[in-house]
Image (cartoon, helix red, strand yellow):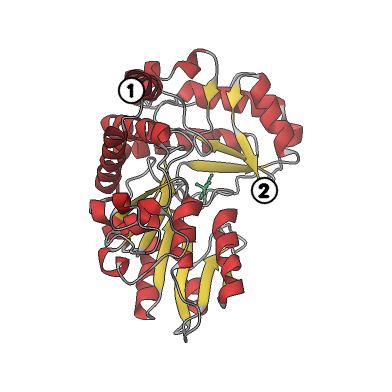
């Protein structure tokens, strides 16, 4: 039986305007932007331009470094930072590792508070610092799939140097109150690192509003770029007090000084960078972010909220167990559904040309600007035919 959805008349207005720019939808329903955004005509064009520039000019490094600077400016605008506060990195891991390498853990503040919603790389990087004297304390998840502020309040103290929080959890879609945590942490003299990867491009992200000290993310999900490019924000006042020991020549004060007898990190957040920039990914990132800005991130957030309420209504009808909090304020774009065999469910969807992913026993469903109410219906149809793979209630 086909799913009957009540459809708001406006719900497909955004995809009607932009979906044609993402050719995958001619063949598949891409419902997996939490993992990788769909390829657009403009990102494909950016890659083609990179190859043409390389072929035409041989080694246009001045231009390529200039593209890196363009990426820095666009990212800064996107998160309401100053370009001098932004490092263009190859991944979240690279930026956060550079930060960790520059923090001392030998004084009175050696405790790192890490939420249990963190992506593996964040937990692993902070645990790696235990070799250097750090003490890592985890803030556990509550039974309702959230981490209440009181749990951070109990964990953050005068010995805490840094609190690491993910804005939206990659495995259950729960959203953390970064602002509330920043207030608590700052009262106690601790710094805050936000991992915004599952938020950026799907909701407006503003480092000033969040009041975080550091923020890391990348471009391959809701920002429509590709693998190979991340970024790292460091609040201006903190930059010069942190000297990364994981470094490289592109982090140097004067990249082209080529001095092998000196380490003089850049006075800006560029000090968190390392080696040769990932130029092809830089081209793609600029195209992806510009396209997302043209589409509208606030519009996308509103659109995805509507799609997710249709999706939730359908999941209720199926009596599926949704592990993402129901309150729209407590979640991002990602909705996660508990499954008896999440990989089998992803396979069943794949056979119907619906692209999704699984983590931690949950099916991840992530709508974006290009998805429609029909896409939601297609997902629900497959789930309806595979009820045995859904956990109930
Ligand atoms: C929340 C979050 N953080 C970080 C990453 C990845 O980090 P990196 O860029 O180091 O691969 C992902 C997904 O791939 C993620 O979902």
Residue 360, label in figure: 2
Image quadrant occupied by the N terminus: top right
Q: Is residue 81 left or right of residue 187?
A: left
| Residue that appears at 39% across and 81% down | 188
Q: Is residue 221 left or right of residue 233?
A: right
Residue 64, label in figure: none
Q: Position of residue 171 (x, y in %)?
A: 59, 48
Which corner quadrant of the image does residue 102 belong to? Answer: bottom left
Q: Is residue 16 left or right of residue 63?
A: right
Q: Nearer the viewer, residue 131 or 329?
A: 131
Q: Nearer the viewer, residue 186 or 389?
A: 186
Q: Nearer the viewer, residue 335 or 52?
A: 52
Query: In this figure, which residue is indicated by the disc labeled 1?
Result: 53
Secondary structure of the residue carrying numbered label 1: helix
Residue farthest toward the top in the current orientation of the protein? 26
Secondary structure of the residue carrying numbered label 2: loop
Q: Position of residue 164 (x, y in %)?
A: 48, 64
Q: Position of residue 348 (x, y in %)?
A: 70, 25
Q: Earlier in the sequence, mark 1 or mark 2?
A: 1
Q: Is residue 301 above or below residue 132?
A: above
Q: CA distance from mark 1 to mark 2?
A: 43 Å
| Residue that appears at 42% across and 34% down | 281
| Residue that appears at 47% across and 78% down | 160
Q: Nearer the viewer, residue 126 or 165?
A: 126
Q: Is residue 346 above or below residue 329?
A: above
- Ligand 1 within 8 Å, label 1 CB: no
Q: How many marks?
A: 2
For label 2, the crowd category at 10 Å Cα-Cα, with few meaning under 14, some 14 to 19 and many 20 or more, is: few
Residue farthest toward the bottom in the current orientation of the protein? 108
Q: Position of residue 211 (x, y in %)?
A: 31, 64
């Amino acid at each position: 039986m086909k799913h009957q959805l009540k459809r708001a008349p406006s719900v497909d207005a955004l995809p009607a305007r932009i979906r044609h720019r993402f050719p995958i939808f001619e063949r598949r329903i891409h419902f997996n932007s939490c993992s990788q955004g769909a390829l657009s005509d403009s990102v494909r064009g950016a890659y083609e331009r990179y190859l043409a520039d390389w072929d035409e000019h041989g080694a246009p490094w001045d231009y390529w470094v200039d593209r890196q600077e363009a990426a820095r400016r666009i990212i800064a605008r996107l998160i309401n930072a100053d370009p001098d506060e932004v490092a263009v990195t190859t991944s979240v891991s690279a930026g956060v590792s550079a930060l960790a390498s520059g923090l001392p853990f030998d004084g009175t503040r050696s405790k790192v508070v890490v939420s249990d919603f963190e992506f593996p790389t964040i937990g692993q990087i902070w645990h790696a610092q235990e070799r250097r004297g750090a003490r890592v304390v985890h803030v556990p998840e509550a039974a309702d799939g959230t981490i209440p502020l009181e749990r951070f309040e109990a964990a953050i103290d005068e010995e805490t140097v840094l609190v690491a929080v993910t804005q939206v959890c990659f495995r259950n879609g729960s959203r953390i109150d970064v602002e509330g945590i920043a207030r608590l942490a700052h009262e106690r003299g601790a710094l805050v690192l936000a991992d915004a990867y599952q938020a950026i491009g799907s909701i407006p992200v503003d480092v000033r509003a969040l009041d975080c000290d550091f923020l890391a993310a990348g471009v391959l999900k809701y920002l429509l770029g590709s693998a190979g490019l991340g970024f790292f924000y460091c609040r201006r006042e903190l930059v010069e007090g942190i000297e990364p020991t994981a470094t490289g020549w592109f982090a140097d004060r004067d990249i082209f000084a080529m001095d092998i007898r000196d380490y003089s990190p850049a006075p800006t957040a560029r000090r968190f960078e390392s080696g040769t920039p990932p130029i092809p990914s830089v081209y793609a990132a600029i195209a992806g972010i510009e396209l997302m800005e043209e589409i509208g991130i606030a519009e996308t957030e509103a659109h995805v909220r509507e799609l997710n309420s249709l999706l939730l209504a359908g999941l209720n009808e199926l009596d599926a167990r949704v592990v993402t909090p129901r309150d729209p304020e407590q979640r991002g774009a990602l909705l996660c559904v508990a499954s008896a065999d999440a990989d089998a469910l992803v396979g069943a969807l794949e056979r119907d040309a619906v692209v999704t992913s699984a983590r931690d026993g949950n099916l991840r469903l992530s709508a974006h600007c290009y998805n429609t109410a029909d896409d939601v219906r297609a997902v629900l149809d497959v789930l309806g035919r595979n009820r045995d793979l859904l956990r109930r209630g």
